[in-house]
Amino acid sequence: MPSAPRPSDRAALLTRRRQSKMARSAHAYVRGNTARFYEWLAEGKPDAVPVGPSVWICGDCHVGNLGPVVDGDGQIGVLIRDLDQAVIGNPAHDLIRLGLSLASACRSANLPGAVSVNVVDALLDGYARAFTRRPRPAQAPKTIAVLLRQAIGRNWKQLVREHLDHTRPQLPLGKRFWPLSKREARALAALLPPDELGPLAVRLGMARPDDRVQVADAAYWVKGCSSLGRPRYAVLLAIDAADGASRLAMLDIKDAPPAAAPRADAPPMPRDNAGRVVAAACALSPGLGERMLPVRLLDHPMVLRELAPQDLKIEPDRLPPAAIDEIGAYLGRVVGDAHARQMDAATRKAWHRTLRASRSKQVEAPSWLWQSIVDALASHERGYLQHCRRHITLIAP
């Protein structure tokens, strides 16, 4: 097992790791570079993208940011699961970014261009169905249904095995978990005092009122790509029930950065970034939002959430090419449902009419969506190659 670096060495190592991850493929670059997407958007013509109703949007709506989420009642569904970049903005931006993610995944898998055409077509169709007068419930394709079954069957023991490699109440320092500085340890202890830990766990649905909850261990968590280099901590909890049973649980405490996505002028959003992320989660993915809290740690706005065993990511690189259009339609519907629940009937109808307008004669996707994805793909491909040139020493031969 590799040795864990000292806190003073983190910044350079994390920057290097992020650059290396983004150099792996054009799709990895797209996933890890939200800022580049909005730079491209700002460079385009103002009227190239329709302006939809002002609602909460994910802001970083790529495939890896959607996946199974469990709510407080134990129900599991595929939802938007990463809201760091969420703002009240233009829903068309989520649609374009998800299309860009799917199209770049097709390119990285060396699939024919026709596959990208079909997946964008399916994406729009699935998204638009959420805004019809009486939308039918979305049916998960086989690949997603398998993932949901895996999520339903997961339990805390599996989560512990994945993250701990053992059943002892200790986070293994090494590749994923790094030691805390003394300042960080003091700050986490102040954030999670023993007398408030039990009520916090009950509020998040992690424990019962009569359970005994205590911090077993904590560490700096090396996780993600675009978030590498920002403060993130894993806290391991030991929960002892009144009947004598005991188990482990985990908290994820993650920095809430300023959002790169352009914001609508109204309605107003929380000024605190952690409050913004939680408010967005409650609007877009209520089952996740109810398991999150805005906190402040070391003068950083942070989001504290329970890490549930059922929370899994969808990895587009592992999706079967034959089903990619079905998956695109389903994920489009997931994002469409998240947007539609924030609109009244008249607004949904008007947005649906905009989505169905300006169709190409050859394909279903409207010209603005297809053209936006093609232009964004070309821009990101240039950015990816320049990134590889700057960081060629990080790329394995």
Image: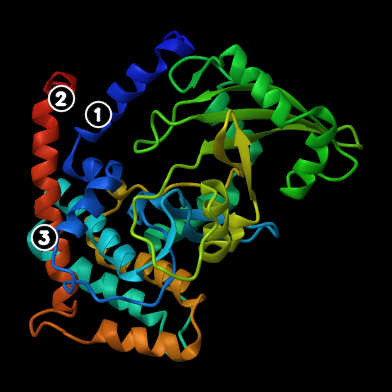
Q: Distance between the Cα atoms at labels 3 and 1?
A: 24 Å
Residue 279, which numbered label?
none
Nearer the observer, 143 or 45: 45
Residue 244 image point, x, y percent: 89, 32
Q: Distance between the Cα atoms at labels 2 and 3?
A: 24 Å
Mark 3 residue type: Asp
202 left or right of 376 in image: right
In the rendered image, the quadrant that contains the C terminus is top left
**Does residue 32 appear in the picture of this structure?**
yes
Mark 2 residue type: His
Q: Earlier in the sequence, mark 3 or mark 1?
A: 1
Q: Which residue is mark 1?
A: 19
Question: Please, what secondary structure does the residue beneath circle 2 have?
Answer: loop
Q: Is residue 53 above or below residue 28?
A: below
Image mark count: 3
Q: Are marks 1 and 2 in contact (CB under 8 Å)?
A: yes
Nearer the observer, 225 or 66: 225
Q: Earlier in the sequence, mark 1 or mark 2?
A: 1
The residue drawn where x is 55% and y is 57% is: 270
Question: Please, what secondary structure does the residue beneath circle 3 have?
Answer: helix
Label 1: few (<14), some or many (≥20) within 10 Å?
many
221 left or right of 287 in image: left
Mark 1 residue type: Gln
Q: Which residue is mark 3?
A: 375
Q: Which residue is mark 2?
A: 391
Residue 48 image point, x, y percent: 16, 72
Q: Quadrant of residue 300?
A: top right
Residue 346 image point, x, y percent: 45, 91
The residue drawn where x is 69% and y is 57% is: 72
Label 3: few (<14), some or many (≥20) within 10 Å?
some
Q: Distance between the Cα atoms at labels 1 and 2?
A: 7 Å
Q: Is residue 219 above or below residue 326?
A: above
